[in-house]
Amino acid sequence: MADDGAVTRVGSGSPYEDAYGFSRAVRAGGTVHVAGSGPIWPDGSCDPSAERQATRCFEIIAAALAQVGVSLDDVVRTRMYLTDAAVADEVGRAHAQAVGHVRPAATMVVVAGLVDPRWLVEIEAEAVPGPTRDIDR
């Protein structure tokens, strides 16, 4: 998808998108912003494992990115919201598996709670397609 300066909005089918009035992802020029993605499976279930939840978040993020012509390889920023610091390593492993190869700037914070009490993690991402270079390697 060419960067023609247009704003493109895409949805994922989450009931929260219509109810709360937001898009799963917005491509504005050359930057793609992916909204906080919770670990919901298509049937509405939620795995109790924090690592599986984080992996599911990245699956949702990857699908949204694909709709606007980019991939997890283009992610430059992630934000991970956890309900318990004890699951940080599990979420970190899923993060490394999904985007560790591109080493985005990342933040992991513990919050009091998320919209669904089953969720241990919610993740958002930003992507910018194009060539990259690593200065410190």
Image (cartoon, rainbow, N blue to C red):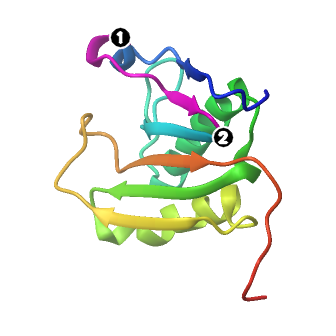
> Which residue is denoted by mark 2 in the rendering?
30
Kindly indicate the quadrant of the structure image that contains residue 61.
top right
Decide which of 17, 130 is in the foreground and name it. 130
Asked if residue 57 lies left or right of residue 102, the reply is left
Asked if residue 124 lies left or right of residue 71, the reply is left
Looking at the image, which residue sits at the far right? 131
The reply to whether the magenta stretch includes residue 22 is yes
Looking at the image, which residue sits at the far top? 18
Kindly indicate the quadrant of the structure image that contains residue 9.
top right
Q: Amino acid at mark 1?
A: Asp
- C-alpha separation, residue under disc 1 versus residue under disc 2: 25 Å
- Please name the residue shown 54% across and 58% down the image: 77
Of discs 1 and 2, which sits in the foreground?
A: 2
Mark 2 falls on what kind of element? loop
- Please name the residue shown 73% across and 64% down the image: 102
Q: Which residues are magenta?
A: 18-30
Asked if residue 84 lies left or right of residue 73, the reply is left
Image position of 106 with respect to 22: above or below: below
Quarter of the figure with the N terminus = top right
Q: Position of residue 11 (x, y in %)?
A: 52, 18
Q: Position of residue 111 (x, y in %)?
A: 22, 57
Image position of 68 with respect to 32: above or below: above
Q: Position of residue 137 (x, y in %)?
A: 79, 88
Q: Amino acid at mark 2?
A: Gly
> Which residue is denoted by mark 1 in the rendering?
18
